[in-house]
Image: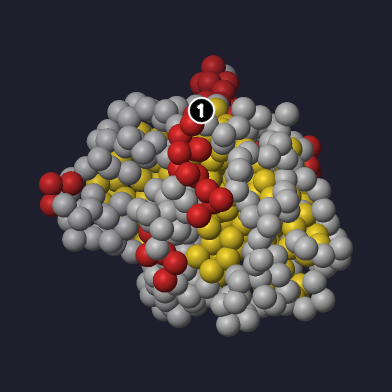
Amino acid sequence: MKYVALLLLCLFTACFCFSQNGFTSLFDGKTLKGWKRVVGSGDYAVQDGMIVGTTVGGSPNTFLATDKEYGDFILTFDARVDDTASNSGVQIRSHYNADEINGDNKGRVYGYQVEEDPSSRAWSGGIYEEARRGWLYPVTLNPSVQNVFKAGEWNHYTIECIGNTIKTWINDKPVAYLIDNASSKGFIALQVHAVSDASMAGKKMYWKNIKIKTGGLVPAAFLQDVFIVNTIPNNLSKDEAGDGWRLLFDGKTSNGWRGAFKTGFPDHGWKIDSGMITVLKSHGEQGRNGGDIVTLDQYSAFDLTFQFKLTPGANSGVKYFVTLKENSDSSAIGLEFQVLDDKLHPDAKLGRNGNRTLSSLYDLIPANKSERYFNQPGKWNWGRVIVYPNNHVEHWLNGIKVLEYERGSKAFEDLVAISKYKIWDHFGEGKEGHILLQDHGDEVSFRSIKIKVLE
């Protein structure tokens, strides 16, 4: 009888551990049952209750994927990367196409990846899209948790995928919040990253306690002030609205906008269609077609985000603190987030030290950006301008801060004094101003224009 009772207790304990609080183990601690390697020759083995991945020279990224696909779920696991020169990640809602993906990336795994990054960049918990759009949520957007991941130690991950929302936590700290509808289900996979240097072969990464819950899911609360990346065009989520964000463009009408020097919206030169507001091409003549458009409202301290798509060789801009008081015979005057095709438009080579290139403070401060983190004409990028109540200003491009300055400071005024703006007294120092989309005579589209007023 004791033997039977002990056996029942063991069976109960095993079942409880295997499906505790609705979670089911994806790794039995002994074998790779339920997993398969796809792409690459990186090695995976089971050791002391862990899955151990090992880098192999000459191999592309390698993935150990679940046999099953998962849609909505909460995934938890422990991860360790010992070498700070290595990085890894866990794929979610991902796929493998042995032929082609949209005519490209033949034979590659593609889909969302949650980063394991022990390097000084410290983007662990960020969300990358393998073999497609690249970085969707770099952890620069939530810098207070960039050092939560500890190299050489076990780190506990939680990933929540419910509907079009993906949230990540590391060691119970909220990291990334993404709203995106590119993929609703797919496999989960452990990555062994490709290595270009032979000395990096043989580096190891480790995973254990891999568990998933697929039923009875309840979204967990996230800190309200964590920035949300929402890639769904002209969409404002409940959490964004609750944090004070609002749309400046509804995706359908010109409500909230007018011509910079008009009482209404331009009757030509601009088009609203397919969720985009587009300035039409007019042979590069600045402000001579429909002209610039501005918000009806004015703003002083704010967080502004917008998506933009350039055509090859195009030039435009997003201006702020536009007062419309300056005497200008073409474009309205204001501080400008430059929107430009750096490769094909000649303006990129003018000015000083690249201060007329994409995302620069036009003619004043060049953007410090890497080509790796922005998309070429024909694809969408997103810009961000933050003006704090103390007049500290930041420009961001695709989630990366590319410049900052103090509006009205001595350094700012010195830059104005050697710029094209020197003819206007106190340029860019107004108490408040309109937001402006520029007509520079080239076709450029905008969408998902959002603003949060800062107190």
Residue 279: x, y in percent? 67, 72
Give the camera-side residue of 150 and 9: 150
Q: Is residue 440 left or right of residue 67?
A: right
The answer, for residue 258, to whether it is visible in the render is: yes
Give the camera-side residue of 158 and 23: 158
Give the camera-side residue of 190 and 114: 114
Residue 327: x, y in percent? 68, 57
The quadrant of the image that shows the N terminus is: top right
Q: How many marks?
A: 1
Q: Is residue 239 left or right of residue 99?
A: right
Residue 183: x, y in percent? 60, 61
* Secondary structure state at the residue bearing disc 1: helix
At 73% from the left edge and 51% from the top edge, which residue is drawn?
Answer: 325
User: Which residue position is annotated with label 1?
Assistant: 144
At 65% from the left edge and 49% from the top edge, which residue is drawn?
Answer: 320
In the displayed structure, 102 sits above or below 73; it is below
Q: How is the image coloured?
A: secondary structure
In the displayed structure, 144 sits above or below 66; it is above
The answer, for residue 444, to whether it is visible in the render is: no
The quadrant of the image that shows the C terminus is: top right
At 69% from the left edge and 77% from the top edge, which residue is drawn?
Answer: 289
Q: Is residue 448 left or right of residue 156?
A: right
User: Which of the 4 image quarters holds residue 159?
Assistant: top right
